[in-house]
Image: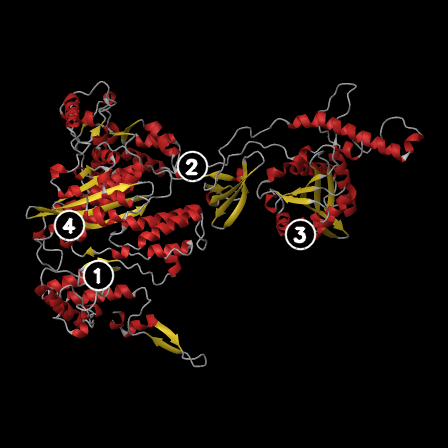
Amino acid sequence: MFLRIKILPEDQDALRFLWRDTPKDKLKVCAMTSLIFGANCSPFIAQFIKNKNAQRYESSKPAAVKAILQQHYMDDYIDSVDSIETARQLIKEVTFIHGQGGFEIRNWTSNFKEVLSYIPTEALGPTAVRFDIEQHSERTLGLMWFPKQDTLGFDVSFKRIPTNIVAGEKIPTKREMLRVIMSIFDVFGFLSPFTIRGKIILQETWQSGIGWDESLTDELYIKWTEWLKSLKGISQISIPRHYLAAARASEMEDVPSALNSGGSGVYDKLALHVFSDASTKAMCAVAYWRWERNDKIYVAFIASKCKVAPIKQSLSVPRLELQAAVLAARLADTIVTQHKIKPRNKYFWSDSTTVLHWIRNDARNYQTFVAHRLGEIDELTCSSEWRYVPTRLNTADAATREECDMAILEGAWLYGPSFLCCNEADWPEDLLISNSTVQNVTEYVATIGKITLCLPACPDPERFSSWIRLLKSTCMVLAFVDKLCRKRTGEVDGAMTDRAEKLLMRYAQAQSFVEDLEQLKKGKSLDRKSNLLTVSPFLDEQGVLRVGGRIDAAPGIARDMKHPIILDGRHPTARLIIMHYHKKFAHGNHETVINEIKQRFWILRLRPTVKNIVSKCVLCRIRKARPQQPRMGDLPEARLAHHQRPFTYCGLDLFGPMKIAVGRRHQIRYGVLFTCMTVRAIHIELVQTLTTDSLIMALRRMASQRGWPSNLLSDNGSNLRGADNELKKAMHELDQDILKKEAVNYGTTWTFIPPLSPHWGGAWERLIRSVKTSLKAILKERVPREEVLITLMAEVEQIVNSRPLTHVSVEPATTEAITPNHFLLGTSSNLPLLGAFDDSDLFLRKQWRISQLLADQFWRRWVKEVLPQMLPRKKWHHESQPLQIGDLVVIVDPNMPRGVWPRGIIEAVLPGRDGRVRVVDVRTKSGLLRRPAVRVAILPVGEEC
């Protein structure tokens, strides 16, 4: 078909390609002159040309043109007519029209030999040539059609699938199992009770976590082999092609000979019956024709639709039954639309009383899931068409089970339930409609009365998210109506906008103030319990409810201010208006919005409604989003490791740069601060450059004097808040892997804290400030010499290590406060120790014992005096909402404006030892970022804007 369509020379460059016979030949530039296989545009162009060619003969050969437009599937033509003469004429005209377009239609096949004798032998298909010799089949939209018997069958040969898999001799993988299941093409759902079983098994493989190329488990393999056993019976199933033959054989004696399913006159009192059912495994809808002829009733299978139930555990069985009812409504709509014969009545059968109550209930105050599906059912069906059927008589139940019964498949499934062959009086009784129910409803209406609610026709405000959009849509509807009625020009102008607004106001008021409007229209006073009693409402000339009030005498004031329009704050229209004013005034304060709204509208519960809407405004929530600080965690082991050598647990940080004078030149030096995490002592080293090698040498110098630490902690390069740009750049260039490997050589574990979390390193951040403060106090030169700077750093180290760790008492006879120097020098400063000593103290063993005794004394004092001060939490006392995987968040960056903070979704959470999430991995458009919880703010999802 494609090659018969030629392309204009000016368009052939679109199908240009390069070609050469051998690699040594010169490249040739070629272009296709016809449509080619594989081009995305070829099917559309072929269909367009076919239809365009047929439309030229619409006036002279309308039947053939209609057949070409509606009964062709790409290059296949499938049709069915009432008589042999009609078939011959149609074949002649279709062949002629296609021939005029350059299409030669061939391989004709028919279920009547008289039709085949009219067609030339060279145009017949192989099945037609062997009509009287063998039982040959013809593929028709995935089904096997046997023209001589005029029946449909199914191809289950699986030629491209290994035999041992189909025979059940080999355990298949999930990929191989899917190939077998999808090889059964059943577009009309004849085999739904069988095919759905295979899909259920496939779903179970997904739930078990089996990979595509992994073999099934033993349990699944047993189910698979049982399903394959029932596969053998599928090839024996034969289904009559047309409905008359598909009806029960005992009732077909008086059926006339026909080529198709018969003309419309054959089907008297034609009715469509659709059954629906669902279980925790599957949902199904199956449809049947029921008609009468010569006082006999016939039932024939039409089609079915079946789906596997969702894996979500939140869907209850009633909701699955409702989804099956939607499936039935869609199936019925497709059948009625696509069939030439039209039913007189439609019946929908369900065994779920809950679903039937939902469909017939007029008070539609349901959740979103139920409400949307009930809305679709209302559009496609009428509530009076739904009836109850017991489960044992519901044929759709056969396709919702895990077991497939071939007897049911060849019995009630293909020929319909037995009660359809009976009179309507013998059908199952509808449990939802009984005399007692009707009587109770009548008594209830007679007792309380009935108010007729007449709503003006306008767009539903609940389907809009903007007041302006709702107003413009209403204007377009009114303009369209005006054009149809030829009353006005239909142009959207100020008058049209005013009409649309008044229409929406009347619609909202008719829904909110039913009883009040009824009383005002009758000229009666309002009820004492009415919410509008104090505002003296009245109806203006356009039927809009307004405030009466007491300020009519005020001169020069617009009518909307004297008599504002009354609305209920709970109605969607009022909420859209409030949101419009909230956005109009740039998401400002509540009082501005309330003041502006009161100039035109009187909205009940205005202030709480404004607060409620603003609280759900996504933009406002993003602007006000704040990270939630987790409760302060427990102190790490490094802060509590008493009776350990100082600097066993060490924190490292850098500060600078600092300028020094070398001759007449100025050079840069950086400070490396080592902090003992336990006794809070510091050690300072100077480095010339911030390279990996310089930092390693500084560490080795410190370790030579203080010993190698067992654990070393340091900042991530992005944590340097307020630091010099040069220092930040140098930190980013440090190779963390080399630093870690060098530390491991000496038995040290080097850990970097998460990015953008300087509060994790507060133990050394505060001491850098102390160093800088002391340095400013004693440094008299702006650019000292290097020798001076080294000396000053040693003095600063001595000063900071002399600070007390506990409260300093001023009472007499109290011991001095413990300091970091007590653990380094044995005293609070470098002054001599107080006390009397003799020559015996010079013995090495005794000096060692004295130092050990002093160290133990200092540690006992540290445990008694310093450790208790660490017990209380100074801040972050309250629990916060923990971050979870899947949360939509914004990453707080103090160095960037709030509007450009990156957004992302949390992919992983890293809780601390106390179980609280303190670090998360966030997936953003720039990649995966690791951030502390204090830098991440949760954004609202799925809430009203």
- Nearer to us of marks 4 and 2 is 4
Q: What's under tag 4, amino acid-wise? A: Arg
In whole angstroms, how far apart are the C-alphas of marks 1 and 2?
Answer: 63 Å
* Circle 4 SS class: loop
Instruction: Tell me if mark 3 has few (under 14), some (14-19) or many (20+) residues whose alpha carbon lies within 10 angstroms of its own.
Output: few
In whole angstroms, how far apart are the C-alphas of marks 4 and 2?
Answer: 66 Å
Q: Quadrant of residue 673?
A: top right
Q: What's under tag 3, amino acid-wise? A: Ile
Mark earlier in primary sequence (1, 2): 1
Mark earlier in primary sequence (4, 1): 1
Instruction: Tell me if mark 2 has few (under 14), some (14-19) or many (20+) residues whose alpha carbon lies within 10 angstroms of its own.
Output: some
Total numbered badges shown on the rendered structure: 4
Q: Are marks 4 and 3 in contact (CB under 8 Å)?
A: no
User: Would you name the residue on which mark 3 appears?
Assistant: 738
In percent of width and height, residue 738 lies at 67, 52
User: Would you name the residue on which mark 2 appears?
Assistant: 621
* Circle 2 SS class: helix
Q: What's under tag 2, amino acid-wise? A: Arg
User: Would you name the residue on which mark 4 appears?
Assistant: 248
